[in-house]
Amino acid sequence: MNETDETFMRRAIALSAQAAATPGAQPFGAVVVKDGQVVGEGFNQAIGKLDPTSHGETEAMRDACNRLGTLDLSGCTVFTSCEPCALCVAAMQIAKVDAVVYAAAMADSARVLGGVGPDRRVRVDATALRLETSAPIGTHRMKARRALVAEAVGVLEGWAARP
């Protein structure tokens, strides 16, 4: 790791420490870097916001998208205090993030936080989540079915046909 990467990783870890001291937050922080500059930062606020997508990485990407005025984070690297879950990896791929650098592995997080009570943590098995999200919908523990297909496809076709 070079000196610049270390600086960005230290900022992500500092955000995780800030989150650890913030009611309704969980100890995961991240920064988005483009051209050697931090363009977004955030930490997990899922409990406080009642938002299961409020992870450190997603908050940092939201901040970066707002600051840069784009959904395209090509050329960006996400530095995060912990290995990203499937939701965050998918969000990074959708936003076209170039790279991710992380500190603690999922196994570290599971080992350290496995016994934390439900009043402070929504317990998710991130490894199982990765396996489940890579399988086709309908094969997960969550049931899935289709309904009103023609109507939904009609809306998509109408939108796609607009100039």
Image (cartoon, helix red, strand yellow):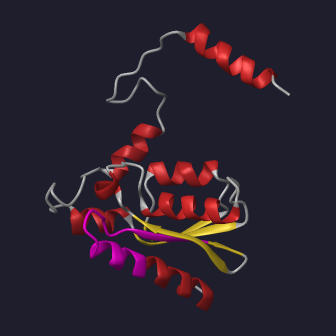
What is the x, y in percent for residue 82? 41, 68
What is the x, y in percent for residue 81? 42, 72
Residue name at image x 23 percent, y 69 percent: 112
**115 above or below 152?**
below
Residue name at image x 62 percent, y 60 percent: 66
Q: How many badges with numbers are in the image? A: 0
Q: Quadrant of the N terminus?
A: bottom right
Residue name at image x 56 percent, y 60 percent: 61
Residue 134 among magenta residues: no
Residue name at image x 47 percent, y 68 percent: 42
Quadrant of the rendered structure where residue 78 is? Answer: bottom right
Q: Is residue 78 left or right of residue 136?
A: right
Residue at the extreme right: 163
- The region drawn magenta spans 14-32
What is the x, y in percent for residue 73? 68, 59
**18 above or below 59?**
below
Pick the residue in front: 25 or 29. Answer: 25
Pick the residue in front: 68 or 76. Answer: 68
Pick the residue in front: 32 or 144. Answer: 32
What is the x, y in percent for residue 160? 76, 24
Q: Is residue 158 left or right of residue 101?
A: right
Quadrant of the rendered structure where residue 163 is? Answer: top right
Quadrant of the rendered structure where residue 96 is? Answer: bottom right
Residue 18 among magenta residues: yes
